[in-house]
Image (cartoon, rainbow, N blue to C red):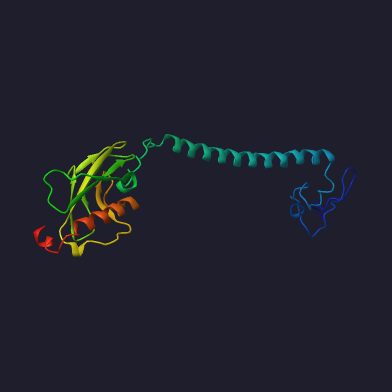
């Protein structure tokens, strides 16, 4: 019988170590990283491989930290640039002027002679009105709270006073009805209407015990005559 039979191992030939039922090309191949943790080759890594792996990890960590720091610096620099280049209003708002009652002072000077031509049962006294600071203050009205008295001032309102200046004001009162005048006034006051660039205010100035004494005496003198003076006043 002719033909070619199986080749017998001869000189220079070796039998395959692979089992006959597993083809050679199906032999499993281990592709895992021999240097990865837990891999079979991890413990067998050479000292040189371990030395090379350490700097690689340090470099990766350092690179991530450097990128994070650089990003933060760029964000800060960009925000600072936007704040520095935006327009700023360097003008400061001017403070509001004070209320007129806060800067005006009225003090009592004493009794003075009544102006010529004044009607009977009249008396006069003087006050000093000054402005401490702020814009000029205009006195638009001077009144008193008692129904039985009328009042005029010299200078007549309105008059204006600048900061640092003062006006001597002569106030003349006339008794119009004795029954409506006070007796034994304790703390008499003047109502003064003030106006400046901030506001208009009506302020009551208490002029002190000297004014209370002089006013009480003047009222007693004016109303000391008989009651018929009320009709002739």
Of all residues, the one furthest to the left in this rendering is 232
Position of residue 129 relative to residue 146, above or below, is: above
Q: Is residue 51 visible?
A: yes
**Percent position of residue 145, x then y:** 23, 58
**Quadrant, the C terminus:** bottom left
Residue beneath the point at 42% across and 34% down: 85
Left/right of residue 107 with respect to residue 15 in the rendered view: left
**Percent position of residue 144, x then y:** 23, 55
Residue beneath the point at 20% across and 64% down: 180
Judge by depth and name the residue closer to the eye, 54 or 146.
146
Which image quadrant for residue 62? top right
Q: Is residue 204 visible?
A: no
Residue beneath the point at 75% across and 48% down: 33
Left/right of residue 85 with respect to residue 17 in the rendered view: left
**Percent position of residue 48, x then y:** 82, 38
Which image quadrant for residue 178? bottom left
**Quadrant, the N terminus:** bottom right
**Percent position of residue 100, x then y:** 30, 46
């Amino acid at each position: 019988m002719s033909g070619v039979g199986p080749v017998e191992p001869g000189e220079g030939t070796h039998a395959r170590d692979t089992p006959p039922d597993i083809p050679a090309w199906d032999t499993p191949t281990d592709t895992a990283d021999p240097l990865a943790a837990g891999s079979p080759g991890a413990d067998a890594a050479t000292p040189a491989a371990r030395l090379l792996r350490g700097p690689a990890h340090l470099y990766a960590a350092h690179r991530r930290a450097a990128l994070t720091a650089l990003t933060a610096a760029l964000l800060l620099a960009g925000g600072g640039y936007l704040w520095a280049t935006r327009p700023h209003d360097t003008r400061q708002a001017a403070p509001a002027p004070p209320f007129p009652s806060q800067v005006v002072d009225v003090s009592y000077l004493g009794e003075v002679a009544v102006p010529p031509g004044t009607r009977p049962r009249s008396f006069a006294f003087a006050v000093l009105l000054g402005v401490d600071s702020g814009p000029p203050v205009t006195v638009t009205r001077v009144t008193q709270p008692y129904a039985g008295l009328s009042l005029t001032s010299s200078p007549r309102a309105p008059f204006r006073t600048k900061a640092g200046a003062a006006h001597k004001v002569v106030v003349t009162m006339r008794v119009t009805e004795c029954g409506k005048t006070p007796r034994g006034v304790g703390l008499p006051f003047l109502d003064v209407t003030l106006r400046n660039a901030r506001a208009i205010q009506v302020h009551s100035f208490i002029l002190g015990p000297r004014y209370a004494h002089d006013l009480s005496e003047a009222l007693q003198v004016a109303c000391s005559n008989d009651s018929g003076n009320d009709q002739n006043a």
